[in-house]
Image: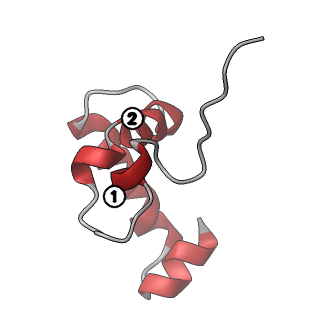
Amino acid sequence: MTAPARELGITERTVKAHIARIVEKLEQQTRLQVAVLAALAHEQLCSDPRCECHETGVPPGFSVTAAA
């Protein structure tokens, strides 16, 4: 979390506090749960018209493969 703090010009403690509040607001228990929730909701939340999610329906970094 040092990189986001440095990039935003805030302390690491502040980053942790904000993340904890996001986890709480989304009624999740872990940051991983929030990340999964964000990935699943990406298409609805994304405002970038160039994002591949609008063409494929799949968030960037995810792939859909057929089961063997």
Q: Residues within 10 Å of mark 2 (few under 14, many from 20)?
A: few
Q: Secondary structure at mark 1?
A: helix
Label 2 vs 1, first from the N-terminus? 1
Return the x and y of residue 57 as percentages of the image width and height. Answer: 39, 42
Please tell me which residue is depicted at 35% across the width and 47% down the height of the picture: 42
* Residue annotated with mark 1: 18
Q: Identify whether 12 is placed above or below 54.
A: below
Disc number placed over residue 28 in the picture, else none:
none
Residue projecting furthest to the right: 68
In the rendered image, the quadrant that contains the N terminus is bottom right
Please tell me which residue is depicted at 46% across the width and 42% down the height of the picture: 58
**Count of labels shown?**
2
Q: Secondary structure at mark 2?
A: helix
Q: Is residue 24 left or right of residue 29?
A: left
* Residue annotated with mark 2: 40
Observer-nearest residue: 65 or 15?
A: 65
Tags 2 and 1 touching, CB below 8 Å: no
Q: Identify whether 52 is placed above or below 30.
A: below
Observer-nearest residue: 42 or 17?
A: 42
User: What is the quadrant of residue 15 in the picture?
Assistant: bottom left
Q: Identify whether 14 is placed above or below 67.
A: below
Return the x and y of residue 23 as percentages of the image width and height. Answer: 34, 39
Q: Is residue 22 left or right of residue 15?
A: left
Residue projecting furthest to the top: 68
